[in-house]
Amino acid sequence: MPRYSGAMPRDSSRPRRATIHDVAAVSGISRGTVSRVLNGEPYVSEHARIAVEQAIAQVGYVRNTAARNLVTQRSRAIALVVHEPHSLVLEDPNIGNILLGTNAVLSEADYQMVTLILDSQRDSDRVAEYLRGGFVDGAIILSARAGDPIALAVAQLGIPASFVGHPTDTPDLPYIGINNTAAAEQITRRLLATGRTRVGMIASALDRDSGHDRLAGFTAALGDAFDPNLVVSYPLYQYSSGADGMRELLRRDPNIDGVFAASDAIAAGAMDVLKQAGRRIPEDVGIVGFDDSTWALRCFPALSTVRQPADALGRRAAQQVLDQLAGEKAPSGGLLLDTEIVWRDSA
Amino acid sequence: MPRYSGAMPRDSSRPRRATIHDVAAVSGISRGTVSRVLNGEPYVSEHARIAVEQAIAQVGYVRNTAARNLVTQRSRAIALVVHEPHSLVLEDPNIGNILLGTNAVLSEADYQMVTLILDSQRDSDRVAEYLRGGFVDGAIILSARAGDPIALAVAQLGIPASFVGHPTDTPDLPYIGINNTAAAEQITRRLLATGRTRVGMIASALDRDSGHDRLAGFTAALGDAFDPNLVVSYPLYQYSSGADGMRELLRRDPNIDGVFAASDAIAAGAMDVLKQAGRRIPEDVGIVGFDDSTWALRCFPALSTVRQPADALGRRAAQQVLDQLAGEKAPSGGLLLDTEIVWRDSA
DNA sequence: TTGTACGCGTTATCAT
DNA sequence: ATGATAACGCGTACAA
């Protein structure tokens, strides 16, 4: 819990901001009417409006929204909590598109989206404090992990919220997601249909529903042919995980002829290692990814993958929060959006 | 200016949050002392502390930070304003690393970083309102453009701020940057030193200092050999700009043998087009980029480029804001950090 | 060590 | 149409 060191410097060198009080004094109009002018309310005389507007310009008044929030009990801001190691914020294409969708909806509804990035434990506590502090009317939480303190804080606080991908152990909070299991199973079957017999997986982020479920789908698709020895796992969805994972898989079974990578970035890393090892793609080894990110088209050959409706995920999550704000009660279950297989040349 | 539709529903279905008042009532201790316990101040008896803590747990009290901010005139939050079309937030590697550096410094100082993403005009007005509203104690502004309303709002408001890359026309606000002109000139000279005679540039973002200055450096390096016909320009630092730009350059001069791309993403687009056109890199055409992003290593052959100290940019900007918050007066000039040429195989 | 009372800047209510 | 005045929830001199 942060400490505050003593009194604030009232004699700050910066000039004090003008307040409604000042505007009232200068214009000779009461604070109440000034407030009415500010908010464009009816029942204000032309005379008063003009006097107030002049005074506002004269004293350089700008509204203190924090004070307004205190009395209206609203902030007109919604938090978007991104729970990722920072270096990945840029690598994960879905996050960008989810941001896009969320902000589009919130902006349209005239809400300010504030993005809170969360990495260390220290960040985590501070963000929880921020969420509790009345700075925001609601929250959208991305990629929460199992045992997430933020998820707990949100649940306990009863603040309108929506999760994009929900941690496996949280109480039933509303969430938006995709059916990772089904999508993973589908693309794995498609990979198998190209005639592969030794198919492995580079899994990732098993502490999140996305990672966990993609592995489950892979396992289901393989059925009896599943060989746990051909599955490796890394914490983060990133290029280096794919490179490391592919090296390990090649070591475990040089005859491997198919790979399901848990993300496109991972697939890209794996492909580079395969090429270095002299394997042709897709002739010797077929590989598929997940996300349909910019990686997919930068790969050579172009990557077959699962397209995530990232923009729609963001939009729906934002809409869920707005609905709750409008008084609807939170949906208790999840809402899963459809994915689509994009078949290219890598398998 | 946002309108607020009538009165708030005081009879909201959600239960009212507990306040210090409630804690005081339940514990039988005065509000003043409760506040002291909350803030860990000295001169509180063991008896009082225990009673208060029990009451807090009992009524489920959480502090309303917005109210505290009103009285302390502080929010302990700092805005990071990102002025980019959303789809680029993920493509620009520097932004991610600047975020990283900024958050590290702010987090260490126990400030909450709130990222405000800015795309449309509507966003712009709302963010300005947010900055003025007392939600944040300071602001760091990324990639502001010429005539930026946010920059103006910040300047007018006198809020502690630091720019990362400053728009060419703003009043002298403190900023952190790199010497784009010198860096561009250096790498262009290096490219020329490989014996190229027909060297073009794919410029970008000329309304920002970075884009403008990189073109200036290129021009300076070429001197008399500068041919305006070999310069094309696109608004955004992105892959497609590079692809389009390279096609155009090849059309204008099929014998072009050197290209300076204003960013790595642009270079990547250009390289793919060159390969499609049957040009060998670096034998037929040498190409260099700017940023040393993940693109640079994903290119084949690996891209020669300029490394930006993105993390350091973020850290220094954050530190500048913290310094101003601590009472130091804002430095009136800019602070330029060193860049480094990373020479690889593309030229 | 503790309680009282005032102020932060705004909106909302109720007279007028 | 407008002006007092009471909240909003908290911190903090000042008094006790």
Image (cartoon, coloured by chain):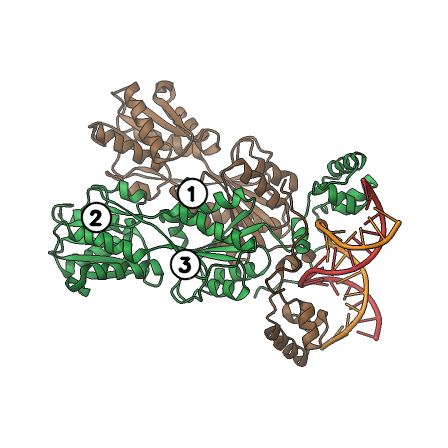
Chain colours: A brown, B green, C red, D orange
Residue drawn where x is 19% and y is 54% of the image: B189
Which chain hosts label 2? B
Left or right placement of residue A255 versus residue B282 in this view: right
Q: Amino acid at mark 2?
A: Met
Residue B51 placement (x, y as % from top left)? 79, 36
Query: Can I make out residue B143 in this image?
Result: no
Which chain hosts label 3? B
Question: Which residue in the protein does label 2 denote?
Answer: B271
Residue in front for this viewpoint, B109 or A295: B109
Q: How many marks?
A: 3
Gap in Å between the C-alphas at discs 2 and 1?
26 Å
Position of the C terminus of chain A by quadrant: top left
Question: Which residue in the protein does label 1 denote?
Answer: A89
Left or right placement of residue B173 versus residue A31 in this view: left
User: Do the dots labelled 3 and 1 sit on one chain?
Assistant: no
User: Do the dots labelled 2 and 3 sit on one chain?
Assistant: yes
Q: Amino acid at mark 1?
A: Val
Residue A137 placement (x, y as % from top left)? 61, 50
Q: Amino acid at mark 3?
A: Gly
Residue drawn where x is 12% and y is 48% of the image: B284
Q: Residues within 10 Å of mark 3 (few under 14, many from 20)?
A: some
Mark 2 vs mark 3, foreground winner is 3
Residue drawn where x is 78% and y is 46% of the image: B31
Rendered view: B38 above or below C11: above
Which chain hosts label 1? A
Secondary structure category for the residue under label 3: strand
Residue C1 placement (x, y as % from top left)? 81, 40
Q: Which mark is residue B334?
A: 3
Left or right placement of residue B40 versus residue B91 in this view: right
Residue in front for this viewpoint, A271 or A175: A271
Gap in Å between the C-alphas at discs 2 and 3?
35 Å
Residue in front for this viewpoint, A265 or D9: D9
